[in-house]
Amino acid sequence: MPVTTVEVTSIEQADGITTLTCAETTGQDQHAELPLLYYPGYTVIEGPGTAFKTANGLVGVTVPANYTGTIRVTYREPKRWLAADVVSLVTAVVLLCAMRRKKSKRRKEA
């Protein structure tokens, strides 16, 4: 069973955004597979439909019945990853401050 079941006019990638131009002509919701490896966080930012993981491990997009136009997809980091980045940054700052204090203590003792 093919993953792409709509008429695809073009697929363009620029600045982290993949733009799919397509037409659904069967009157039923269909799918299009994009040339992107799937990671959780891909989302449709413009147009209808949703992003999902295809059987091939790529990003797929649902295309509603009778839709003709463009759908834009991009990757957005999950919020928990942003929280992990903040924790890492705070840890690095704390370690740097602790190293500076230890260094300045040694200088005062000498």
Image (cartoon, rainbow, N blue to C red):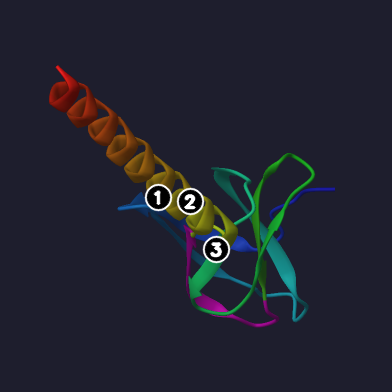
Q: Can residue 108 be found in the magenta stretch?
A: no
Frontmost of labels 2 and 3 is: 2
**Residue 77 in view (yes/no):** no
Q: Is residue 92 above or below residue 67?
A: above
Quarter of the rendering containing residue 63: bottom right
Image position, residue 25 (x, y; %): 67, 75
Mark 2 and 3 residues: CB-CB less than 8 Å, in contact?
no
In the current view of this chain or complex, which residue is farthest to the right? 1
Image position, residue 104 (x, y; %): 18, 30
Closer to us: 93 or 55: 93
* Horizontal side, residue 96 vs residue 75: left or right: left
In the current view of this chain or complex, which residue is farthest to the front? 109
Secondary structure type for disc 1: helix
Check disc 3 and report the residue beneath it: 79
Callout 3 amino acid: Lys
* Horizontal side, residue 59 vs residue 101: left or right: right
Check disc 1 and report the residue beneath it: 90
Give how far apart the Cα atoms at labels 1 and 3 are.
Answer: 17 Å
Residue segment shown in magenta:
64-75
- Classify mark 3: residues with Cα within 10 Å, few (<14), some (14-19) or many (20+): few
Q: Residue at x 72, y 59 (%)?
A: 5
Q: Is residue 52 above or below residue 84?
A: below
Q: Residue at x 74, y 49 (%)?
A: 54
Q: Is residue 94 above or below residue 23?
A: above
Callout 2 amino acid: Val
Image position, residue 83 (x, y; %): 51, 58
Closer to us: 92 or 48: 92
